[in-house]
Each structure stands twice: as C-alpha cells, then as structure tokens.
Image: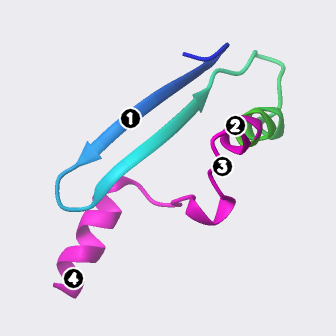
Amino acid sequence: MIGRTRIHLDRVKGIGDFIELEVVLEDDESPESGIAEARRLMADPGIASSSLVASAYIGLINAKTDKG
C-alpha cells in the first residue's frame, strides 16, 4: 500500500509481469480523482501511459491463444 492505493505485483503465466494500482475512493469522490492519483504514482518509477493495458488478464491470454 502507498497511502490509499493498493499495489499488486502480478506474474501471469504465458503473458508476463504486471503492476496493478487500485486506488480506494471515498464515497463522494469521482473516478477521475482516482485516475489522477494512479497517474501520479506511475510517474515516479517512469511507467508510461502507453504501457497501460485495457483488458483483463483473461482477455490477454485469449488474444495470445488466438494468435498462437
């Protein structure tokens, strides 16, 4: 945890290693606020926005299987 953000380090067989940032929002807080906080956390170690993955691991696994 960093502040209110849970950091998950995941190794998924067949597709690689991932960092997941899970910002816990207050009830009255906008999703945009959480996105801004995650982007601040990404900046320090130099994680580029272009590295973001929009699908779940199963989607990545299925896409790799379909290409394989």
| Quarter of the figure with residue 10 | top left
Q: Position of residue 3 (x, y in %)?
A: 67, 13
Pointer 2: what residue? 38
Q: Is residue 14 above or below residue 17?
A: below
Instruction: Give the amino acid at mark 3.
Output: Gly
Q: CA distance from mark 1 to mark 3?
A: 16 Å
Pointer 1: what residue? 9
Report the side of 46 relative to 68 (left or right): right
Instruction: Give the amino acid at mark 4.
Output: Asp
Q: Indicate yes or no whether the magenta region holds residue 13.
A: no
Instruction: Give the amino acid at mark 1.
Output: Leu
Label number found at residue 46: 3
Instruction: Give the amino acid at mark 2.
Output: Ala
Q: Quadrant of the C terminus?
A: bottom left
- Circle 2/circle 1 CB separation < 8 Å: no
Q: Indicate yes or no whether the magenta region holds residue 67.
A: yes
Earlier sequence position, callout 1 versus callout 3 = 1
Earlier sequence position, callout 3 versus callout 4 = 3
Mark in front: 4 vs 2: 2
Pointer 4: what residue? 66
Q: Position of residue 50 (x, y in %)?
A: 63, 66
Mark in front: 2 vs 3: 3
